[in-house]
Amino acid sequence: MPGQRRTEITPPLLGVDTYLANVLDQVGPLPPIGLSLLDASGCVLAADIHAAHPLPSFDNSSMDGYAVIAADVAAATRQQPVRLRVVDDVPAGFVATESVQPGTAVRIMTGAPVPEGADAVVQVERTDGGERVVAIREPVPPGANIRRLGEDVLSGEVVLRAGTLLTERQIALLAALGHDSVQVHPRPRVVVLSTGSELVEPGGELRKGLIHDSNSFLLVAATLAAGAIAYRLPPLVDDEELVLTTLQDQLHRADLVLTTGGVSMGAYDPVKAALKTLGTFTFTKVAMNPGMPQGFGVLQDGSPRGLPVLTLPGNPVSAFVSFEAFGRPLIRTLQGRAQIHRPAVRALAACDFRSPAGKRQFARGRFTSTSPLAVEPVGGQGSHVLGGLALAECLIVVPEDVTEVSAGSPVTVWDLRT
């Protein structure tokens, strides 16, 4: 009507937790595959592992020394050693051909099977090291220095549960139990794509109005640190058709696509336009600082699951914080990890600082002391300030309803060093 002033109604911002829940509701662990042990390192176990045999699988010596009958050497002293006839010599990987009888011993190396008749091993340091006759200078109790069959793992025992992250320690156990391959949820293959006509590759010529692409390098490094496999693409100019073609070309090798840039409220948003033609996507504003514009959806690639695509803001600090808040949990969910977030710790604010009302702030910070654990904001807090981000050791997470943080007050911290 004439004379009536219309005001555009801005929908309320979506909460950080709500947005993350919406993203994770649409994905799950990648289907299990069989991988060789070394290829499985860093992956998550898809099924329980039962021991096919005990560990150790036979009684063996934990020391270089002499297999004896403990009662034979009970009275041994340095002044009056007990002398025993050495009837055999057993290195690791071999079995004694002679049993231990009263008054005899078998020289034995670490890991070798304990000979029949012996109930203890005397360390070589407690003897004179004799080859035909050995002088035992100290007594040992029955069972001394013997690793018993099954004392580590029993046959049939569940040694690793599904959901276990396989590190070097679990890989060693699997190898010891005879596994040369294992069923795991694989590390997600993540394609990282930056868009923007202003972007040039590092090392390229910078004309006025151009900047070097840092976001894709940032996100590839963050993706690798989160446990995934990353593929970086060169930056794309703001062209919807080019973005569309590039995304379609990546379907065969991606479990997740991360894009940065091209999803703001501006006039040139090629990522938005391209993605809306390929699947169901939601672009929204999240109540966080930095990193308000966010997007997520599933691209229809012909598979039952579809290909998830997470679109992050173009400002580098916003892209990093958004990755920590949403990208890292998404990657770890695809990987089947139980712990998808960085551990949150409590610390004390080392100084006063402010936080925007109605938004969860992720302030870049550094630790000022360890006892008590204290933090302070570091560098500029703008969404473009890479120098400050490079100095950050943590993110200080300030709730939406807090606008002022006082020195000495407790704060939640995501430790970026872990």
Image (cartoon, rainbow, N blue to C red):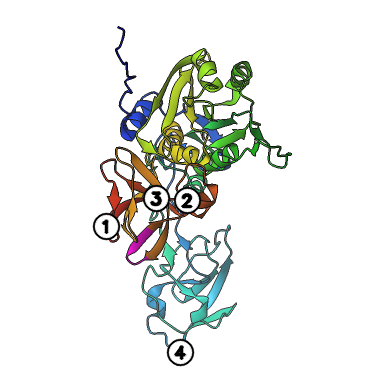
Q: Nearer the viewer, mark 4 or mark 2?
A: 2
Distance, label 1 to label 3, CA atoms, is 48 Å
**Foreground residue, 400 or 393?**
400
Q: Mark 3 highlights which residue?
A: 153
Distance, label 1 to label 4, CA atoms, is 65 Å
The reply to whether residue 63 is visible in this rendering is yes
Q: Callout 1, which amino acid?
A: Ser
Of pointers 1 and 2, the one earlier in the residue sequence: 2
Q: Mark 4 highlights which residue?
A: 78
Of pointers 3 and 2, the one earlier in the residue sequence: 3
Q: Callout 3, which amino acid?
A: Val
Q: Quadrant of residue 121?
A: bottom left
Distance, label 3 to label 4, CA atoms, is 38 Å
Q: Callout 4, which amino acid?
A: Arg
The reply to whether residue 179 is visible in this rendering is no
Q: Nearer the viewer, mark 1 or mark 2?
A: 2
> What span is colored magenta in the figure?
370-375
Which percent across, then down, holds residue 254? 56, 26
Which percent across, then down, holds residue 339? 37, 42
Q: Mark 2 highlights which residue?
A: 380
